[in-house]
Amino acid sequence: MNTGRSAAGAWQGSAGGIAARVLVLGLIVAVALWAVAPLLAADNWTGVAIVAVVTAAGLFVYLTPRRLPVKYLLPTTLLVLAFQVFPVVHTMSLALTNIGDGHLGTKQDAIAAIESSSVKRQPGSAEFRLTVAEKDGDLVFLLASAGRAYTGTAGGLRPLEGATLGAGGRITAAGGYTVLTAAQASARSSEITELIVPVEGGAIRSQGLSRAYRGTATLAYDEGCDCVTGQDGVWRADEEQGRFVSDDGRALAQGWKVGVGLANLTAALTNPKINAHFLGVFGWNLVYATSVVVLTAGLGVAVALVLHHPRMRAVRAYRTLIVLPYAMPAFAMLLVWRDMFNTDFGLINRMFGLDVDWLGAPLTARLSVLLVQLWLGFPYMFLIATGALQTIPPEYLEAAQVDGATAWQRFGKVTLPLLMLALAPLLVSSFAFNFNNFNGIFLVTAGGPFPADNPTVGATDLLITYTFRLAFGQQGAQYGLASAMSIYVYLIVAVLSIIGFRRTRAFQEVGR
């Protein structure tokens, strides 16, 4: 107790402690103000409440002279909540919704998008002289008609004061806006075409780079029947699906976000399009992760033992060369290896005079991704094994040698158990990482090769790449389904990791 009070007193009383407290309190308040501003602008009162609670807790902890351990634990706790707990909870919440392409916003957002996207030009519709400009990185239409100037954005049409009109009636300059040149506008022509300025009863769209027109919406929302009407039919709101559906089953592309309960989680288990190949992908996933761990650990330990031998020379040079793959950016090296496996121009075929389609056949593609991960991963195991070897007391090996143990017996009975004491937890972590090694597969084979009759699942697909293709395939992004699949992958990895860590307890007896 006296030690804690003296420490607290030192924290409060010393000049350094006071300066540290002022700095911490100022940082807390500054971060709180920075975080609250956009939350207030978006009317996100839940976020405002969270920021207020966290700020109050921080001020209470650091303004109080006691509770010294909490002063150090609070930042760590907040980081764990922000980067560990929140992503998991958020993923679970997304899995209970239909969020995805066409279901990102509210119902009102969907109605506005449906009406705006259905705008068509009618005879005699109003025309505007168009000038494409930019403000704060966003594209803006500067519109002129009958001597009046307007600004058009996705948020609507507003009058523009102080604009300069040229001889042709177009706006040539406006305060706060950067007018794009013809070349700049041409480079962003797709954005200009997609920009729709909503107005009452329709919207304003561009016609080329110098003109715009006010069109009429061919689809309109009727609040009385809660439906969208048009010349081609009537689409009624389906609150369960979050979209407008006609009597004959046609649905408008734009919908809204709604809760679907366990539908995504159930679909991942019962939908034949999803689970038909699950066991096959899961089996290869286990083989891939286990093989990578065994190969990298085996080669890393073997090389570490060779360089640890007292008669070995130029050890530093060899260690530097071995660590080079680990120092290279994995993202770039994966792409380099992909090109090296190219059938026609790849370095491997040209160097050895081969004609092997490495990434075109299931067996060779799987061998290729294992070889790439072996090259990338064994330097890490080598470094860990090298450090662990240096901690083994030489007396143990000398005693075993005096007792008549052979070199293999000394390795199996003394060196390997002591190495596993340090390596076992890292092997489990490496297995969990490689089980979800998206880049290692996607950047080399993209999950392929694929059967001619099934482009959904490939020979090298892991569960994570299979999930990515299902959720972000030809039908657009389905974040809810992707979140549901991610939950299952997380549970599988968690169970396997728990089993692995329990197995590593056997090596703890070696260190006692």
Image: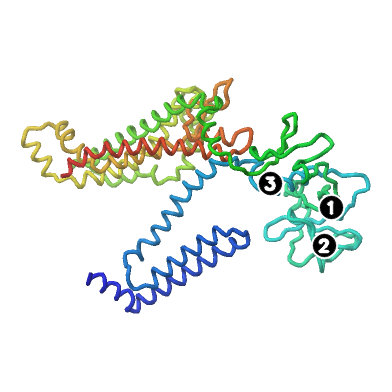
Earlier along the polypeptide chain: callout 1 or callout 2?
2
What mark, if any, has residue 107 been given in the picture? 3
- Taking the spot 76% from the left edge, 37% from the top edge, the residue there is 235
Quarter the C terminus occupies? top left
Disc 1 residue type (three-letter):
Ser
Earlier along the polypeptide chain: callout 3 or callout 1?
3
The residue that disc 2 covers is 172
Question: Residue 510, percent across and down?
Answer: 17, 40
What mark, if any, has residue 210 been given in the picture? 1
Q: Secondary structure at mark 3?
A: helix
- Taking the spot 9% from the left edge, 40% from the top edge, the residue there is 398
Quote the CA–CA distance across marks 3 and 1. Answer: 34 Å
- Taking the spot 44% from the left edge, 27% from the top edge, the residue there is 366
Question: Residue 195, percent across and down?
Answer: 75, 49
426, above or below 451, in the image: below
Quote the CA–CA distance across marks 2 and 3. Answer: 38 Å
